[in-house]
């Protein structure tokens, strides 16, 4: 029995899966308390947290570090971890990399592109696998919609079926036409997780920085559910003003020694003079 089975049962019942990214323990804890089904520790950690220019810069050590943090913050939640660029080129590489992420706390490993042989090898070794088709940030220089032509859509449909036959439990569909994402979702046993792929997938995922307003860039596929970036900037600016004005810390933020201890210290300092 796989830990993914309850989510596949939700797909069969037509219940939507709620997936969101997290990269640290406090965020993971908040998301678990908010009732999300799955946390994705994506290679998006590179551009959203680590300041990298591209997802390709993310290392296996980076992913293990952040997966471990998320696991500490949300011990009970199902965690999908991304295999970073150039760590799954062969089934052997993928197995070695997946073990690192599993040891860090991942329940499932995800990778981009159509590699049913890699899916099969990981599944045979006992790993839950999440595929990823459509926009592949690790492999495509320009981030744009995929599957716009009939030929491209047919290829993605076949790739989804091949991954399904190899045993994938989940399949992320990114920036695909909604009708294609719907057809794939109905054709595969895996639970599909859409991002910019319309309403007909089995669940949705967003980057937490995007939905909470930490990032300032607008994306068509995203809806802002908060403005944490503005709130944080305002809080830090107010703190800076108070420090410079001598308004923080106030008496209520400090503590004093007991009178006898203060007297003893003063005597000791007097003797040192």
Image: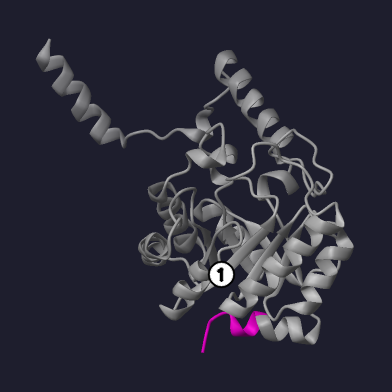
| The C terminus sits in image quarter | top left
Which is more toward the observer, 64 or 198?
198
Q: Is residue 158 magenta?
A: no
- Which residue is situated farthest in the bottom direction here? 1
Circle 1 Cα neighbour tier, 10 Å, few/some/many (<14 / 14–19 / ≥20): many
**Where on the picture, by quarter, is residue 267?**
top left
The magenta segment is 1-7
Look at the picture and state if 185 lies above or below 189.
Answer: above
* Residue 13 location (% of width, % of height): 78, 86
Give whichever of 90, 273 is nearer the camera: 90
Residue at the (67%, 44%) spot, across then down: 209
Q: Residue furthest front?
A: 151
Residue identified by numbered label 1: 116
- Image coordinates of residue 205 in percent, x first then y, are 71, 59
Assign a secondary structure to mark 1: helix
* Residue 127 shows in the view: yes
**Residue at 24% across, 34% down:** 261
């Amino acid at each position: 029995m796989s830990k993914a089975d309850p989510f596949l049962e939700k797909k069969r019942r037509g219940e939507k899966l709620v997936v969101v990214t997290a990269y640290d323990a406090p965020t993971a804890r908040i998301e678990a308390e908010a009732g999300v089904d799955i946390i994705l520790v994506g290679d998006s950690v590179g551009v959203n947290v680590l300041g990298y220019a591209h997802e390709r810069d993310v290392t296996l050590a980076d992913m293990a570090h952040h997966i471990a943090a998320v696991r500490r913050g949300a011990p009970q939640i199902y965690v999908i971890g991304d295999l970073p660029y150039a760590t799954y080129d062969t089934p052997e590489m993928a197995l070695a990399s997946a073990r690192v992420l599993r040891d860090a706390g991942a329940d499932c490993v995800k990778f981009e592109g159509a590699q049913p042989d890699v899916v099969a090898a990981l599944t045979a070794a006992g790993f839950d696998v999440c595929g990823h088709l459509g926009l592949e940030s690790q492999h495509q220089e320009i981030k744009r919609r995929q599957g716009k032509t009939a030929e491209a859509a047919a290829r993605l449909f076949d790739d989804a079926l091949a991954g399904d036959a190899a045993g994938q439990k989940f399949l992320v569909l990114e920036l695909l036409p909604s009708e294609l994402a719907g057809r794939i979702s109905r054709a595969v046993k895996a639970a599909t997780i859409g991002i910019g792929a319309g309403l007909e997938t089995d669940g949705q995922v967003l980057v937490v920085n995007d939905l909470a307003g930490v990032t300032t860039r607008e994306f068509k596929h995203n809806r802002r559910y908060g403005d944490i970036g503005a709130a944080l900037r305002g809080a830090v600016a107010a703190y800076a003003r108070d420090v410079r004005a001598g308004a923080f810390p106030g008496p209520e933020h400090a503590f004093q020694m007991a009178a006898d201890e203060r007297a003893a210290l003063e005597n000791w300092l007097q003797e040192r003079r």
